[in-house]
Every structure is written in structure tokens, then in C-alpha cells.
Amino acid sequence: MSFDQVLNQKAFINGNWVEGSGSKQFAVTNPATGETIIEVSDCTAQDAENAIAAAKAAFKPWASKTAKERCQIMRRWFEIVIEHEQELAELLSTEQGKPLAEALGEIRYGAAYIEWFAEEARRTYGDIVPTPKGDARVLVMKQPVGVVAAITPWNFPNAMIARKAAPALAAGCSIVIKPAEDTPLSALALAQMAKLAGIPDGVINIVPTSDAQAVGNVLTTHEDIAKVSFTGSTQVGRLIMRNGAETIKKLSLELGGNAPFIVFDDADLDRAVDGAVTSKYRNSGQTCVCANRLYVQAGIYDAFVEKFSAKVAELKVGGAFESDVALGPLINKAAVAKVEELVGDAIDKGASVTIGANPSDKGELFYNPTILRDVSRDARVLREEIFGPVAPVIKFDDEADAIALANDSEFGLAGYFFSKDLGRVWRVAEALECGIVGVNEGVTSAVEAPFGGIKQSGLGREGSHYGLDDYLELKYVLMGGLAE
Ligand code: ADP
């Protein structure tokens, strides 16, 4: 297929490509150039209703297929995505801005969720439990929750969808997906691949829209939606939780993070520097698990800042298709404005700039990789999710100080630390208040591992064998009267 052949313009409802009921479109732009890529159907609340009706009709037939049948169709979906990984990566880079190599990594990462959950579909075992009554047995079986709504962000336009759709389908659920307004094209292309794979009509539906609130309200309040899986800001997460209260929706929420990245005196310095570079600057700092605050112990603080700055100075900023580019543009003007505001606040409160802290001459949405040292502990950049290529580096004295600083946040998604002391590794890993801990590693994501946060970073886990549970209900059946 060519790039143009994976570029879809219409919404995907009940296996058909349809115009929105309002007959309107909205523009999807390339953040690197500001140019419109294509105008996409702008779905309304009515379209969301239609998609839910289609998903409801498709649910029982899909759930009644054997797990092996679902597995085979999903495997085909995985294979087709991999066959077209180059075109899908190009599409992703064009709408989102990340370097092509990173986009290709995301397509493979997203596909790996489809592969993994295709396999897990066949392992939704129940239990038979001994009971105190001799003539009875307790059976526990697992059944799909029903129709799922997914609302996803723009930072991983493919993987965030695969990570929700794959476990939903494996469990036997059908799904309606509202992709982020900045990046609906990768979602539509994934649906296109699903159709080619033979996923039945109505099992996957995609409703792109520029009106997140109208469509989001339907998806999060409709009585035929059993569960909402959301990835995005904590603010919208709260709203979705409130919306779901009336009909007691099951919820998976992957919300904001404020990841601490701690380097102890005894760390392997080069490894810590490499970990900081990838953790901080991947996707131009626009991931919810990006290092947000770097705490470095006093004894190696200056050495760390020096080596880290030298590495970061080598990072090339540019368009996704330039060679050796490490950082693409930020997603939109609001993202650039927020980064500038946080950097300004840190400098006003006494931080000094080691590198960057200015827009790049590559274009309106490009911002240079930035390191701020001696950042005051009350700077906003340590409290708020930066979502940009800015690394504030703060000095700490001892282990207790580091743990207290790291845990001083309402968020609890990812945390990282570097140390070679085995006792410290155990102590700190257990003490950090977050759902994911990277020890001597700056990137932790893997389909085999449970991804998710504690505190106000969310509910539920994605990926791993635990990830399927979020889409399954337990049913307890008491089998009585078994005596002769
Ligand atoms: P970000 O700051 O990363 O864009 P958001 O939480 O605003 O995070 O967006 C994540 C997803 O939530 C997007 O698909 C967006 O369209 C959607 N969204 C935004 N507002 C609402 C809302 N009121 N109801 C439902 N979904 C919403």
C-alpha cells in the first residue's frame, strides 16, 4: 500500500466508512509544517449513538465466537499491521510529528499488544473452588464486560488504541473509539487493517470528532456502554469518572504523571545519563512516563549535569523524515506556550539554563531540548506535567530526602532511579509511590508488563496478563444438589 492508501477520510461505523451526520469535516494538520494533511469526517453525538448501537449488535456474536476464533482473527490483524508498518509509521509521523524511527517503534509496539492479547484470549481460565457443602461446588467464570468506549490521546496515536482495543476484543467485547482530534488518522488506519483482517462489522468503530465534549458525553454516559477506558489528562479523567457515576461504569484511567528520576552517588553515571536522555526526550518529552523531575545526589550532581548536557547538545531537532533527528515538534501551540511558561517560572525562581530554554528555528512548534539546573523546589515545573523537552535537575542529600521529594506529588505513574547498591534498590523500589519503577532503566514499557498508575494517575492496568482482567467480569456460579 502507498501512504495515500492508508489515509482515510471518513468515520468507521458498523464496518462502513461514513460521513458524520452533520456533514462537516475538520482539518488534521502536520505539526512540523502547519499544513493540512486531510479533512476528516467530524462526528456528532448522533454518530456516537449510531456507533454504540452497532457495537451493541456486534457484541454477542463476537463474544460467542470461541477464543481460538477470536485469536485467529486478531493474529491476522497483527500480521496485516506489520505488513504495512512503513506506511503506518509515515502516517503517524505526519500527523503527530515524532521521528520516523520512533513512529515505526510505536507501530511495532502497538501491534505487539494485538499479538499478545490474541494469545491471551485463549487463557481466560476460571476456577472451581471447594465449598464447605459436600454436595455443592463453586465455579468462577470470566465473561466480557460488554460494549467498551475508548478515548485516547495524541501522543501515541496508534499504540494507545491498540492497547485498549486488543484486550477488549480478546475478552469478547466490542468497542467504540474516539481518537484525539489532533491525530485521528492512525486510528482510522488501524480500523482499516482490522477490516482487512476480517474483524466483523461493528466490533470496532471509530468516531473522529472536533467536539470531544459532545461525543465524549455520549460515550461516557450511555447506558449501553459497560466500560470506559481513557488515557489523557487527570482533569478529563475526573470528568469521565463523574460522567460514569450515574450508570456505574467500569473504568480504566491512565492519567497524568510526574515521574521522578533519581540518580544516587553510587550509580553508573553513564548509564544514568543515557537513561535520562531517553526517558526525558523521547517523543519530545510528550509521554506520561517521561522523566519530569531529575533528582541527583550532591556528590555527582555537577558531573551528571555536565555529561547529561553534553549528550543533550548532540540531539538533533527537526522534521520526522530528516535523518538522525531525535526531537520532532510539539503537538500544538498550546503545548509550546505551556513549556515556555514553565521554563520562565523556573528561571524567575532562580534556575539557571544549562542548555536550550528557547524555541528552535525549525518551525513554530519546535522547542530546543532544555536542561535547567539548581531549580527551586517550589518551581511549577516540578509540580506539573511538562509534556515537553525540559529537564529540571535538582540536588538532594540522602536517600530519605530523595524518597520524600519523589513522593511529594499527587501523581503516581512512573518513577526511575539509578543505583548499584542492592539494598538501596529494594528499599527505594518499595518506597516509591508509583505503579511503574525503572531501576537502572529509563524506558520500561513492554506489552508483557502491567502499565498503570496509583494515586491520581489512574485506575486499572494495560498490557500483561493482568490487562485482560480490566475487560472481564467474574461470574460466580454455585452448583448445588450434586449428592447422589
Ligand atoms: P491532552 O492534554 O493530552 O490532550 P486530554 O485529556 O485533553 O489530554 O485529551 C485526551 C482525550 O480526551 C482526547 O481524545 C480528547 O479529545 C478527550 N477529551 C477532551 N475533553 C473531553 C471531554 N469533555 N469528554 C470526553 N473526552 C474528552
Image (cartoon, rainbow, N blue to C red):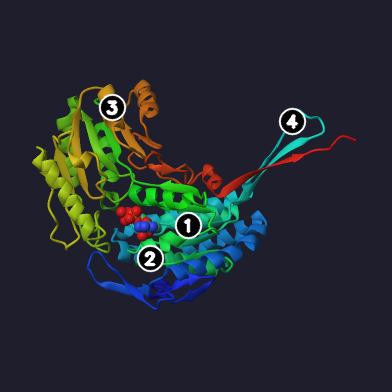
Which mark identifies residue 404? 3
Residue drawn at x 40%, y 62% as measured from the top left: 179
Asked if marks 4 and 2 touch (Cβ < 8 Å), the reply is: no
Q: Comparing marks 4 and 1, which lies closer to the viewer? A: 1
Q: What quarter of the picture does the C terminus occupy?
A: top right
Residue drawn at x 35%, y 30% as measured from the top left: 432
How dense is the environment of label 3, judged by Cα within 10 Å: few (below 14), some, or many (20 and up)?
few
Q: Is mark 2 within 8 Å of ligand 1?
A: no
Specify the quadrant of the image occupied by residue 371.
top left
Q: Residue 206: where, in percent of width, then height?
A: 46, 66
Left or right position of 303 against 444:
left
Q: Residue 83: where, in percent of width, then height?
A: 47, 65
Q: CA separation, marks 3 and 2? A: 40 Å
Q: CA separation, marks 1 and 2? A: 22 Å
Return the residue at label 2: 184
When the figure is inspected, residue 304 is found, relative to residue 31, above or below; the finding is: above
Return the residue at label 4: 131
Q: CA separation, marks 4 and 1? A: 39 Å
Asked if marks 3 and 2 touch (Cβ < 8 Å), the reply is: no
Specify the quadrant of the image occupied by residue 98.
bottom left
Which mark identifies residue 221? 1
Q: CA separation, marks 3 and 1? A: 39 Å
When the figure is inspected, residue 378 is found, relative to residue 78, above or below; the finding is: above
Question: The residue tagged with tag 2: helix, strand or loop?
Answer: loop
How dense is the environment of label 1, judged by Cα within 10 Å: few (below 14), some, or many (20 and up)?
many
Quarter of the rendered structure image containing ligand 1: bottom left
